[in-house]
Amino acid sequence: MLVKVSFWLLYVASLILLEGCSAVIPEDDPTNFKDRAVTRASGGVQVRSAVLSPEESLYNLGYPLATKDIQPIWVEIKNDESTSFFLMLINVDANYFSPSEVAWKFRSYESPDVPKANTLAQRADYFYEKHIPVRIPARSSVSGFVYTNLDPGRKAYTIEVMGRNEVRSLDFFQAVPGFEADYQRVDFRSLHASADRRDLSLNELRRYLEKLPCCASGGDRRTDGDPLNLVFVGEGRKIMAALARRGWDLTETTRASSVGRMVASSVFKSQYRTSPISPLFLFGREQDIALQKVRRNVDERNHMRIWRAPLNMNGEPVWVGQVSRDIGVKLSGVTVVTHKIDPLVDEARLYVTLDMIASRSLRALGHVSGVGPAGRGSGRVNYTRDPYYTDGNRVVLFVSSDRVLTKDIKYLEWEEPQSSRPRN
């Protein structure tokens, strides 16, 4: 343990020296969360909604809900139709908290802002009064909070109301104030404007993807890093929302505070869902977006890097990416310490594909060559000298704006993916 702590401390010191003073993350005014509420409508049903930050939760509800991993969502539903609707809380969060559960978690907490909630029953009544009514009568409006599980960075959720032979379903994907994500440094408007100058057909896209480099470049911008085994076609917000619904988290910028949390997560085996991810390079720049799905601690995670390609396909944005599974940490001669990847990188590619199918956001998929096959004896390694094995293909995932059933997904007859079992 002492050896492990020592090289982690060396790693932290090197990052802090390179970074200098860490940035201060600006917070929105906690009194004005409704000003940034997002509005969606379907038929005669209109929904306004906003996800609260930890500071907003404390200010507006009088309890530090985030300390118990509770994240309230404020929802306002206006029903202009002639029938009543019922809010499907289970679609906002499958594991939402009831008002009594929230009260029980704070049974020993005395809130100076809620002086009349001294007993457990009074606290339960207080959280129930703040909760949104689940019935929305015809020609009326309701508003209140849903107590959901804490998601850092951005939150994807669905407000669905059900009436007699009627369903209205509206998807939301919103930023949580106070979170400094790495993608926020990217000027996507400029990247999209540049890409709009070149628009490919489906067959042209396949040929383009086959000719891309096998891998992203490492930190020296010359040595091959991890293989580019993933492509998305579709609007960036829809892709991010689909991944968020499947438990993928955004990544924080590298700052002294985020590195400190990453060290603590590794040493003490605690979970850190938004830890920084090291840069790889493609199209002359580091990744535009990094996402991850963490297990018990930062040592074990699926992580993904995505770059906006300099072109579109039939008017839709194209994104090239890399996905692999971290299975531990190790010392490295090029980055001091790094994650060790699962050598079966095709398995991570399959995992993302299955996640997108399960998200009901995938309209088509196919595989193209371009990485180059690599068996156990190939000697192929990434930037930090981890060996990897692959059938050499990239999966291409076409993202839909509408929900798609598995039976309706189109499979393109391009390359045939091979077994993920490593070949000699």
Image (spheres, rainbow, N blue to C red):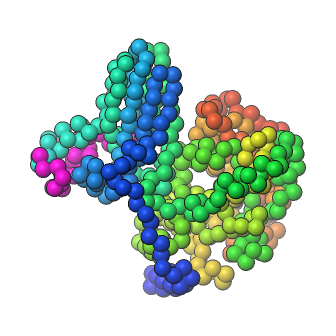
Give residue 157's position: percent from left, percent from top: 48, 40
Numbered range of the magenta stretch: 93-116
Q: Give the vertical position of 32 relative to 140 (above or below).
A: below
The answer, for residue 62, to whether it is visible in the render is: yes
Q: Relative to 178, is 302 on the left or the right?
A: right
Give residue 228's position: percent from left, percent from top: 75, 59
Residue 108 within the magenta-colored segment of the rendering: yes
Q: Give the vertical position of 323 relative to 198 (above or below).
A: below
Residue at 60% x, 32% y: name it.
403
Q: Relative to 321, is 76 on the left or the right?
A: left
Q: Is 353 in front, or is 402?
A: 402
Question: Residue 129: which quarter of the image?
Answer: top left
Give residue 91's position: percent from left, percent from top: 45, 35
Q: Relative to 357, is 113 on the left or the right?
A: left
Q: Quadrant of the N terminus?
A: bottom left
Q: Is 52 in front, or is 424?
A: 52
Residue at 46% x, 60% y: name it.
179
Residue at 28% x, 53% y: name it.
59
Give residue 385's position: percent from left, percent from top: 71, 75
Question: Residue 301: which quarter of the image?
Answer: bottom right
Residue at 76% x, 36% y: name it.
411
The answer, for residue 148, to whether it is visible in the render is: no
Tally the marks.
0
Q: Quadrant of the C terminus?
A: bottom right
Query: Chief secondary structure of the magenta span?
Result: loop
Q: Give the vertical position of 330 relative to 326 (above or below).
A: below
Residue 161 within the magenta-colored segment of the rendering: no
